[in-house]
Image (tube, rainbow, N blue to C red):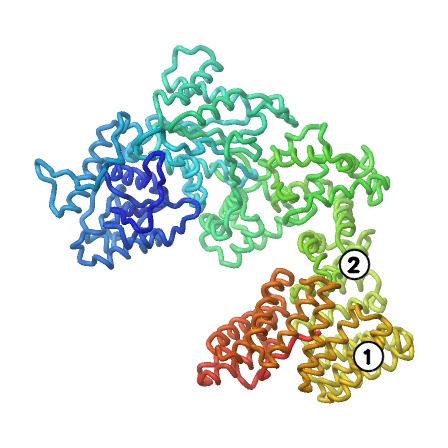
Amino acid sequence: MNPAGTDTTHDAGKTVDFFVSYAGVDQAWAEWIADTLERAGRRVLLEAWDFVPGSNWPALVQAGLTTAGRLLAVLTPAYLASVGAAAQWQAIWAADMGGRGRRLIPVQVEPCEPDTLGLLGSLTWIDLTDLTDLAGPGAAAAARARLLDGIRAAVTGQVRSVNPTPLPTRDTRDVPAAADESERAARYPGRPPLVWGLPPELVRNPRFVGRASELAELRARLTGFDRAVPGPGSPVPGVRAQVVHGLGGVGKTELVVEFAYRYSHAYDLVWWIRGDKMTEVVAGLAALAAQLGLAHVEGDEAAAAAAAEALRAGRPHRRWLLVVDNAVIGNAVIGNAVMGNNAGATATNPYLSRLLQAAETAEFGHLVITSRNPDWAGRATATEVAVLPRRDTIDLLRRHRAALEDAEAERLAAAVGDLPLAAEQAGAWLAASGMTVSDYLAALRVETRELLTRGKPDRYPFIVAAAWNLALDEIGPDEPAVVELLQLAGFFGPEPIPLDLFPALVVLGESNGELGESNGEGTLWSALSAACSSPLRWGDVVARLRALGLGKVEQGTITLHRLVQAVLRDRVPTSRHLEFRATVGWLMIRALPTAIQGNPAAWPRWAALLPHLQAQIEAEPSPADANAAGMLGLGNLAALYLQETGQLAAAVDLHTWVLARTEQVVGTDHPNTLVLRNNLALALQKAGRISEAIGLYERILARASRILESDDPNLGISRNNLASAYWAAGRIAEAVELLEQVVDDAGRIRGPDHPDTLLARSNLANAYQTAGRLAEAIRLHEEVLVDVVRVLGQEHLTTFLVRNNLASSYQASGRTTEALDLYEQVLTGREGVLGDNHPDTLLSRSNLADAYQALGRLPEAIDLYERVLSDARGVLGADHPHILITWNNLACAVAAAGRLAEAIDLYERVLADQRRVLGPDHRDTLTSQGNLANAYRAAGRTNADAADGADPADGADAADGAGD
């Protein structure tokens, strides 16, 4: 319900008379029906009017269905196919199954096949189908009378008599009549536009998919509240000038064509103008002037001005939609200077300005502009059109080749980056050529430019590559920095590229070509590095890139579509690709921090740049590349970053790739190769692939023993790592034996006070504890703590680690109060040195919660676990193994507190996550599995009940603290 100039929302406590249910494509009909009823004094609930910011639409619908006297179903084939609409009318049907209350009233506005009506076919409906597509006001009046007569009959229970009783209403004093009521009323959708000006080639696209929300939102932004029932003052205006912007090929024009057809019945005039050049705008407006009968105006420019004025004044048509397609330079509208080859044609365009003014002042006129440029300086609301959701891309592809398998369709949609024009082109070519999807994808990788010239869809004026080449050709010869930035960005990944990477090119420029030869016009990247040296010039380059519409510039990043990047790379000679990739690698080497482990501050930068590093890896750099060693080093660091953040499967894959390439470059026995093998084995161990890790560690130790000197520290590292894997596999005796050798060797080679020796002794004490030799473990931990405080000090990170390990031994031996005191000391120290949200600090907090639980201080334990989870998810991510362990420990505490049902729910969720992230055989997964089985038994559930979740024999009885 929407009186002019008044609050349009419905009070929760008030009922409505009618809920209008409709499919999105029938919004114009729904608005006309609702407007007609409200002018008759009824209260109406309509999604297009009442779904406003801050409203809970599902709750509003539920309230409307509960409290509305009746539901009006706008009956069309689209309505019958709508799942959401079916849920609405079926709710009313169930409440009035016999139809005695006549609460469900279909209003048919399009013919429907009888066999599609279902239950609705048993009802009597109001039929307006014979009054649609009729010209003149008589059809609207007849439809209005038939609608109101039908509603009156449903409400009163009798057909209208010769002298009908007026439709009962509530007090309508707040809905006064107006002299121009017929003009302000919603336009009758059964009447087509009086003037239709879409070009003949822009017929409605039978393969148009998706975009329902974009179409509805564009309609809502244009109309605002101008559909209001007349009242005091003027209608509340919508924003009647809308710019739809986005990448070439993303479907801006197709979206607006569909909009024009879908909502055509809401307008008396629909007109389309090409906006590439001022002359086209003038010609389009002059043609409109002729259509409007402005024959007295001489000359195209005068006629164009007269047409713009006629639109502003609403004479002879108040309700109009005018589309300006592909307005090249948005800034030209307000007279700003622009760069580029088309600047002369569009630097000043008073006719676009007049159209914007007409849209601002016209009461019911709407202007839609499509453009690559998002910058319209407040003169119109600009909205970006994004690529299609994946499901819609697959739908579009299958409209060309229906037999596409799911996996094929997914791969093809990903390859075209969900770009509608590229998907249309790919689908058309596959249908025409019979090429397999695998062959198409292979060709797309190696013959991008050639393939993107194939399969031009019939209704498109150009192919996808040509759309971008047109934009690239706009770049003037005096803009080499823009060209260089685009070319270089083409060699990154398709994810957002941080713009703060590029100023480092200033250093490269000063080095006089560190990475490559001169390009014949100066040092490689000379124009771009010069632009980067000046914030003002750099800003100009970024602004120009944004105006071209070839990428998205936002929040300090630039994002290019993967196919745009392919076209950009294809414009660069193959012989120079190595230079470009070397520059990208050089920029990342400079930008990425090398201190990753235990350093969350470095992780956001890695998260941002990792996709671009992976793009370089996928390009298979040659070992002969001068930058290859640096890229392999980055690859190793990237794999360590993935380990740190719990992305273990990806870490294993990347470690494997880096190791294989490094062996090609430096050989199998190089010390760097041994380090990389250790890193891979550690990733395998963390991923729960213990037997593979042990096998690799054993091979590493055998090779290291053969090629390294007996006093080489790396030999001790290899033994320590193998011992860790033995311990994880439960081979405790072998782990102890190896660690004792590591301690002896470290003391002999590096001395008893070397940090590596101290750490080795602490690891041996941990192994003693696991082996059940608690007294020896405690004694050794106490000795190590004294030594580490003496050598490294109270606030050293190793001191915190050893103190934490001693606390764990105290807790295992039942000395929980002493353990609690040590845990609190460690937590205080780590908070002071590392900060509240460092992973080690979070781990200390979790260990302290374990101690609280052991002491029976369950409320404190539960509260602390929950705090750890809240803080750690933002640092480590929801799927990090430490997070999953903490969820398990929280479940243990909740179970101990007697909240068994809640604990079972937690166990089930964490077990599902651990199976997904770590695999079914990981130690942590088996621990949670055993805990869930125990909880099932405690709840009296049988083994059959528990079978889907766990086998009690497979896991431990309880989860230990994560420890250090």
Q: Which quadrant of the figure contains the C terminus?
A: bottom right
Question: Dividing the picture into quarters, in which one does residue 855 lie?
Answer: bottom right
Q: Which residue is mark 2?
A: 633
N-terminal of the pair, mark 2 or mark 1, is 2
Pointer 2 local density, CA inside 10 Å: few below 14, some 14–19, many at least 20: some
Q: Which residue is mark 1?
A: 784
Residue 618 seen from this side = no
**Residue at figure coordinates x 62%, y 41% from the top left:** 553
**Residue at figure coordinates x 56%, y 25% from the top left:** 334
Direction from residue 537 to residue 363 in the image, left or right: left
Question: Dividing the picture into quarters, in which one does residue 773 lie?
Answer: bottom right
In x, y percent, where is residue 632? 77, 58
The amino acid on which the numbered mark 2 sits, given as a three-letter code, is Gly
- Measure the alpha-carbon separation of dots 2 and 1: 35 Å
| Relative to 278, residue 756 above or below | below
CB under 8 Å between discs 2 and 1: no
| Relative to 797, residue 545 above or below | above
Q: Which quadrant of the figure contains the N terminus?
A: top left
Q: Nearer the viewer, residue 432 or 520?
A: 520
In x, y percent, where is residue 463? 55, 38
